[in-house]
Image (spheres, rainbow, N blue to C red):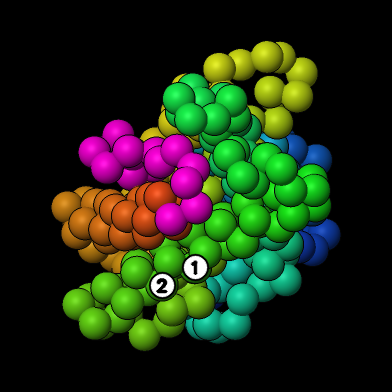
Amino acid sequence: MGKVCIECKYPVPVLYTTSQAAYDRKTGSPVRLTQCPRCKHFADKYVEHDFVVLFIDMVLIKPQVYRHLLFNRLQVAEDDKPDRSIIRLGVLLLLFDVYLTWARIEKQAPTPSTTSTLGILNQQPIVIQYIFFLLLCLTETIIFHSTIRFISFYYYGFTKPNAVSTALLVSSCTKLFPILMVIWNYDVPAAAKSVGWAVVVNNLEALRILLDVSYPKAALLAFSGALVRSLSTNMILYWTGLPMSGWGFEGWV
């Protein structure tokens, strides 16, 4: 599959033409967008939009923006190799996860036997603490992606696991919202929980678009990954004596 219409997913040869003959008098641009032969809409309106517009539409969970990113820009349907920009995004999201997890655990009420929720870890150098939370978040991410990749391959027959990870990373951009906590003082656990649910919903939509499955099947994938991740994280926190995020439904994110 090459380029597709972001409205109806119909294959199109090109998304736009650039020549003096294609000069658009209305926009003053030499770029003319291709019209989809099936739905008669522009095949991909996002080729003329910057990342700010893309990010806003991702927050609004518009399926068109995910078709643009996954099929037309990153072309995950043709090449299963991870894009360098996606790798950089994954590293950035991991660092934000470290900050949120660390802040959430520090904000929780301490146990009666200790004055800090970090327990013995609080007695270690700051570098050791950072490495611990970095490894914890890295383990979370690997487990989450591996679970969804496994289910999508063995149950849905999708043979491009790196494309699944790309979809998950792209749809996790809402994790960048907590940067506002650097400016304004928010309730960290509440902010982390809200961001977590927003990410799960975006993951669901991205998986539905990529795998071309129904909402129930995409929800099964997203929540299965979230459940396995939550169980694994809680076991690690339990073994290290740190407060857990909860075993209930609210603790999955």
Q: Would you say residue 206 is visible in this rendering?
A: no
Q: How many labels does the image show?
A: 2
Which dot marks residue 113? none
Q: Do the residues labelled 1 and 2 touch (CB within 8 Å)?
A: yes
Q: Which of 51 and 35 is in front in this view?
A: 51
- Give amino acid for label 2: Ser
245 is within the stretch colored magenta: yes
Q: In which quarter of the image is the N terminus?
A: bottom left
Residue that lies at the very extreme toward the top in this rendered image: 185
235 is within the stretch colored magenta: no
Residue sitting at 79 percent across and 63 percent down?
Answer: 19
User: Where's residue 32, x and y in %?
Assistant: 67, 54
Between marks 1 and 2, how big is the CA–CA gap? Answer: 6 Å
Magenta part of the chain: 239-253
- Give the residue at mark 1: 142
Q: Give the overall secondary structure of the magenta segment.
A: loop
- Give the residue at mark 2: 146
Residue 134 as seen in the image, left or right of residue 159: right
Residue 23 as seen in the image, left or right of residue 241: right
Q: Quadrant of the C terminus?
A: top left
Question: In the picture shown, does residue 150 fall above or below 198?
Answer: below
User: Where's residue 173, x and y in %?
Assistant: 58, 45
Q: Which of 85 and 250 is in front in this view?
A: 250
